[in-house]
Image: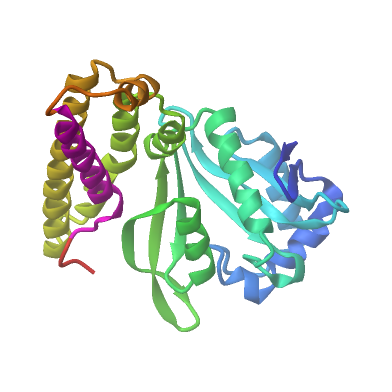
Amino acid sequence: MIRGRLVDLTAIERADLPRLLEWRNTPELRRHFREYRDLSMTHQERWFERSQSDPTVVMRAIRRQADGELLGCCGLVYIHWVNRSAELSLYIGHGNAYIDGDGYAEDAARALLGHAFAGLGLHRVWVEVYAFDEAKRALLEQLGFTLEGTLREHHFRDGRFYQGEYYFLLLTSFLGCLLMPSSRDLLMLFISLELVSAPGFLIAAFRKSDPRSNEAGIKFFLIGVLSTAVMLYGMSLVYGVTGSLNLEQIATALSAALPQGQETLVQAAILFIVAGFAFRRHSSPPGTP
């Protein structure tokens, strides 16, 4: 069992199949799935048996912790154990919510992602989302997923074609987010910041045939290099004055009386570090949508 704050992710039982089948056949929910036909209990039984024996599938029932009520279903599918990647599948069927506003879908997704990276050792988790699926797109962005690519006119629904959009979460960015608040020296702070930011250069220029994507990639790269240089220069000045990269030792050294002329140098160093960090975390490629 995988525990979240609000929900538990448990093994799917045969007793859950009728409820899951009802949700999968509900038009309001099915429009978000790849499935295009009404399913029978025979289909549901086959799906259940396959999910139990297929090593590339990890499916879980979403149950409310307060009363054990079945809320929906989630899992990792198309698991590639060599590339260590998988697709995230998730919906809340209770009340035909799909992506609810009570936090159950978000909690289930966070718990499952934690299991994917820490438990299964995956490197990359991706999701296919259709252009009209605003609820899941908002959830994925809240979770830290980034738009990787678009398949034009990939999905036919309601008499028209929609784009298929692929989101992914790189373990490097996730690792950088975890390392940054736990950094105890300037070197680790810089490495964690790079782990978070570096994938952005590739993502901005992902569409090679799109001139705007190429422009965004170049501008983002130049801004990133400039901000990194400014920040590193400030860190080098701090190291030159204090003789240490450890944040606690730096704080101790700066709290003492500094030799004449070094106080202005320290102020300039702090300005460079803050400016470089602010550019890196809050700027976006100019002139791009």
| Part of the protein shown in magenta | 262-285
Residue 168: give x, y in percent of width and height: 41, 48
Q: Residue at x 65, y 67 (%)?
A: 101
Number of dots carrying numbers: 0
Toward the viewer: 87 or 187?
187
Residue 105 falls left or right of residue 141: right
Residue 69: give x, y in percent of width and height: 84, 56
Q: Residue at x 22, y 24 (%)?
A: 258
Name the image quarter holding residue 37: bottom right
Q: Residue at x 21, y 29 (%)?
A: 235
Residue 12 falls left or right of residue 264: right
Type of secondary structure dominating the magenta stretch: helix
Name the image quarter holding residue 248: top left
Q: Residue at x 71, y 71 (%)?
A: 96
Residue 205: give x, y in percent of width and height: 19, 52
Residue 131 vertical position relative to residue 49 in the rendered view, above or below? below
* Residue 101 is covered by the magenta coloring: no
* Residue 277 is covered by the magenta coloring: yes
Quadrant where the N terminus sits is top right
Quadrant where the C terminus sits is bottom left
Colour scheme of the rendered structure: rainbow
Name the image quarter holding residue 186: top left
Residue 219: give x, y in percent of width and height: 12, 54
Toward the viewer: 206 or 264?
264
Residue 263 falls left or right of residue 247: left
Residue 138 falls left or right of residue 66: left
Q: Extreme top residue here?
A: 243
